[in-house]
Image (spheres, grey):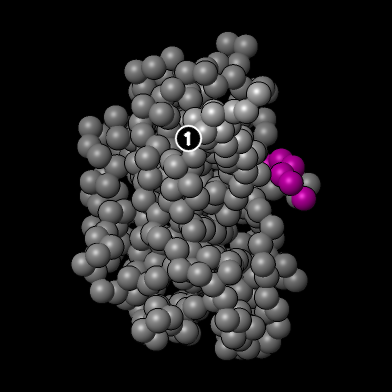
Amino acid sequence: MVKSPLLKKEHLLKNQNTTLKRALKKIAPMLLFLCFGCQPEMTFPVEGNTVDEIVNSYIQSPVNAGVAIGTIKNGNVKTYLYGTAEKSTNQSIDNDTIFEIGSITKVFTTALLADMESDGLLSLNDPVEDFIDIQIPEYNGQKMTLYHLATHTAGFPPAPSNLYSTEPIAFLEQLQNPYKNYTENNLYEYLIQFDPSYPFGTKIEYSNTGIALLGKVLEEVSEMPYQQLLQERVLEPLDMNKTSMFLNFEDNQTWAQGYNQSGVATPHWEFQAIAPAGAICSTLSDMLIFLKANIDQDYSSISEPLAECHTPQFEGPYKDYEKFTVGLGWIILPLEETEKIMVWHNGGTGGFRSFLGFVKETETGVIVLSNSACSVDDIGRAVLKLLQ
């Protein structure tokens, strides 16, 4: 029997949908923020005794575009600028070029948590269900708390299972902008069906979901949108006036263009429900202010709550680490080849990478911003070792 053209078309579409769904399963993990070493990344040699030498291999690669580095030592700030903000125009990087900082956003969210706790508005031990008008899953009667969200010990996977669309066109759009259409309703739908597989507070599992939920709790407590809360409690006290979550991509001429690991220009990422986990955009000059406020407890009115976030909260095995220590949002690990302890976080979106790290004992720190999707973690650590 000969199939009609219509049946052939339906058969072709069915095969295409099946192929896309298989591709989704393979590609979906790549859409996560690249933090805590979540995914293997292209790396570059960082040998050298100067910042220029450390960054040379990275910036000479044709797949990368620009890098902005800021350091603090003995109260002195230095900046190092390399490459371009936009390859096609050869626009140079400067201190006010805007980058997506990805998951470094998470430590702004935990800073809000610590600041609100200092004002008596909430407690780390408060159950999440006290603030959210849906049923929050329990584990054998154990309640999930704000502590569990802030320390990545709530048992959530890196991304919610309902993040990725099974519709071919929507999925293709997600390859470029994965979090754009993930709403608060989507997040609540995921939470209702989430089934924790082990007790809360017993295992580290890095999660965008948990920090997004924490951001929602903070909105409910403050009765204001996350952006406004961030502005009033962190950005304004620190005079970080070039930092935001929802900057205008079209009108702002100081944006860096992001590039993927193949060196191809990629769209800026946009957010709804997952915004507290990765939506902040900032500049080298503003991030140096944030770095200083974290290093120096007397720097600003919020430096004490910031310092609370650096206190070790949980230690356990994580991936290749036997002992992996987390504070509120921050990672706390030995700085390789030194006897110092480093507090750090990194971030990544479709076309950007970032690293923020400091040693409180020596009051030294580094911020690295890149408009390329190749990791700058090695650069950040190598520069921080130079500062010791």
Q: Which residue occupies 49% across, 39% down?
A: 168
Does the magenta run of residues contain 283?
no
Residue 16 position by quadrant: top right
- In the rendered image, the vertical position of residue 368 relative to residue 113, given as above or below: below
Verify whether residue 313 appears in magenta.
Answer: yes
Q: Is residue 257 left or right of residue 82?
A: left
Q: Residue 204: horizontal and vertical position, in percent?
A: 65, 38
Foreground residue, 378 or 269?
269
Residue 385 rendering spot, x and y as whole percentages: 64, 75
Q: Report the quarter where the N terminus lies.
A: top right
Residue 123 locus on image (x, y percent): 41, 30
Q: Relative to 202, does residue 41 appear above or below in the rendering?
A: below
The answer, for residue 96, to whether it is visible in the render is yes
64 relative position to 92: left or right:
right
Secondary structure of the residue carrying tag 1 is: loop
- Quarter of the rendering occupied by the C terminus: bottom right
Residue at 49%, 30% (x, y): give it: 6
Residue farthest toward the top in the current orientation of the protein: 141
Image location (x, y in percent) of residue 304: 39, 52
| Residue 161, placed above or below residue 296 | above
Is residue 104 at all visible to an observer of this figure? Answer: no
In this figure, which residue is indicated by the disc labeled 1?
167
Task: State the extent of the magenta-drawn residues as a range.
Answer: 312-320
